[in-house]
Image (cartoon, helix red, strand yellow):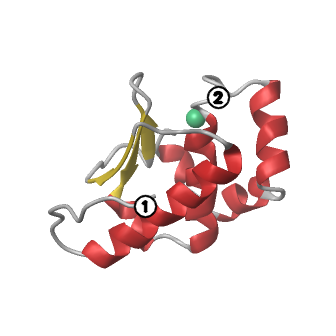
Amino acid sequence: MTRPPDNQGDSRAAKKQFKSEVARWAAIMKVKPAQIRVQSMKKKWASCSNRGWGCFSTDLLLESVAFQKYVIVHELLHLQVPNHGKLFKSLMNAYLPGWEAILAERNGSASRSL
Ligand SMILES: [Zn+2]
């Protein structure tokens, strides 16, 4: 996906890299988010809008690569499955085996919603 450079504040390179990782997963998962944004969000790691936008917290850039991956796959999967039911979990297992271990290792992530 090629996009014109946009105005991002600090850690522009980190955001850019994160977005390209999101785009890479979107291609693997065959979802097409209308827009991917990385912005300051204190209560959530990520969220999806009903317009198909994927929004990720800048705080994620400080997290481990494994946890970033988990959040990316989780959020993109919501473009296919809106809830956290059985289908959601089995698709998580298909795309990211071991995601439950990643989540368990990242204690405290439950304090933010996804
Ligand atoms: Zn969720």
Asked if disc 1 and disc 2 are in contact, CB closer than 8 Å, the reply is: no
Q: Earlier in the sequence, mark 1 or mark 2?
A: 1
Residue closest to the eye, 54 or 34: 34
Quarter for ligand 1? top right
Q: Is residue 58 left or right of residue 70?
A: left
Q: Is residue 18 left or right of residue 94?
A: left
User: 10 Å neighbourhood of mark 1: few (<14), some, or many (≥20)?
Assistant: some
Q: Which mark is residue 66?
A: none
Q: Considering the numbered disc 1 on the image, is that residue within a helix, a strand or a loop?
A: helix
Residue 33, compared with residue 85, is above or below; it is: below
Report x, y in % for residue 72: 56, 52
Residue 31, compared with residue 5, is above or below; it is: above
Amino acid type of the residue that numbered disc 2 sits on in the rendered structure: Gln
Q: Which mark is residue 19?
A: 1
Residue 12, compared with residue 31, is above or below; it is: below
Q: Image point 62% across, 51% down: which residue? A: 27
Q: Image point 36% across, 62% down: which residue? A: 59
Report x, y in % for residue 39: 27, 53
Residue denoted by label 2: 80
Q: Image point 71% across, 62% down: which residue? A: 102
Q: Considering the numbered disc 2 on the image, is that residue within a helix, a strand or a loop?
A: loop
Report x, y in % for residue 100: 77, 52
User: 10 Å neighbourhood of mark 2: few (<14), some, or many (≥20)?
Assistant: some
Q: Image point 75% across, 24% down: which residue? A: 85
**Residue 14 occupies quadrant:** bottom left
Report x, y in % for residue 93: 83, 47
Amino acid type of the residue that numbered disc 1 sits on in the rendered structure: Lys
